[in-house]
Image (tube, rainbow, N blue to C red):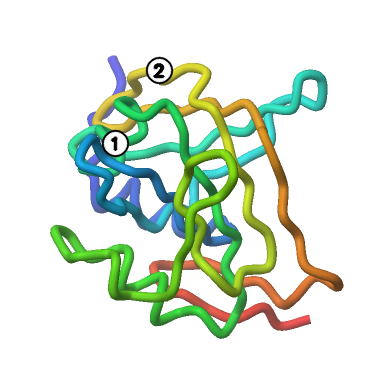
């Protein structure tokens, strides 16, 4: 019989694995901008191009992703810590946190990001309190040279240190 792992202990252990930081956006049924900060993101497949992002199923953004069937993932730069924190706040209005626009794929795109990926929601698999959301990539918008990424490590947002 295995020992029950406490949530805080698990969170601390997972925090020792450095990850990039993203913001996921979608429109809800009323056309309002929804978004959240996520660090559980990965590529899944090249053919077809698929990504995954893990999203808490209790969030408004998750419901919006399910309702609209589309979402965007934005890779954060090292100078966007305040934005990451803003989108991590529960219940806050997202529309005033930064400038954003509509992509030609009908998803909200935030301005001034290194890379933005528009997706169709292909699948959402329940996994505890989160869903593993698999998106088929519709479009990618990357600037010129890659910028220094924002990382998440041991519970802190930290700029890339090459």
Residue shown at 23% from the left, 30% from the top: 4
Residue shown at 63% from the left, 33% from the top: 51
* Rendering coords of residue 50 (x, y %): 67, 27
Assign a secondary structure to mark 2: strand
- Nearer-the-camera pick, 5 or 73: 73
Vertical placement of residue 80 versus 12, above or below:
below
Q: Nearer the viewer, mark 2 or mark 1?
A: 1
- Nearer-the-camera pick, 81 or 114: 114
Q: Which of marks 2 and 1 is nearer the N terminus?
A: 1
* Rendering coords of residue 69 (x, y %): 42, 26
- Nearer-the-camera pick, 40 or 144: 144
On the picture, is 63 further left or further right than 19?
Answer: left
* Residue underneath mark 2: 125
Residue shown at 54% from the left, 27% from the top: 120
Residues packed near mark 1 inside 10 Å, few (<14), some (14 to 19) or many (20 plus): many
Residue shown at 33% from the left, 75% from the top: 97
Image disc number at residue 42: none
On the picture, is 155 further left or further right than 145?
Answer: left
On the picture, is 35 further left or further right than 4?
Answer: right
Vertical placement of residue 160 versus 52, above or below:
below
Image disc number at residue 64: 1
């Amino acid at each position: 019989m295995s020992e029950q792992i406490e949530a805080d202990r698990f969170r601390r252990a997972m925090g020792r694995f450095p990850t990039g930081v993203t913001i996921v956006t979608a429109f809800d049924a009323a056309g309002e901008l929804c978004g959240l900060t996520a660090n559980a993101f990965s590529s899944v497949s090249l053919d077809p191009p698929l990504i995954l992002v893990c999203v808490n199923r209790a969030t408004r953004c998750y419901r919006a992703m399910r309702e609209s069937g589309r979402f965007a993932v934005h890779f954060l730069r090292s100078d966007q810590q305040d934005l990451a924190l803003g989108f991590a706040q529960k219940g806050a209005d997202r529309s005033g946190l930064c400038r954003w626009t509509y992509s030609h794929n009908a998803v909200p795109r935030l301005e001034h990001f290194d890379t933005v990926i528009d997706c169709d929601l292909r699948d959402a698999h329940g996994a505890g309190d989160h869903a593993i959301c698999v998106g088929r990539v519709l479009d990618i918008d990357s600037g010129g040279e890659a910028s220094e990424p924002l990382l998440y490590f041991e519970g802190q947002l930290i700029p890339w240190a090459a």
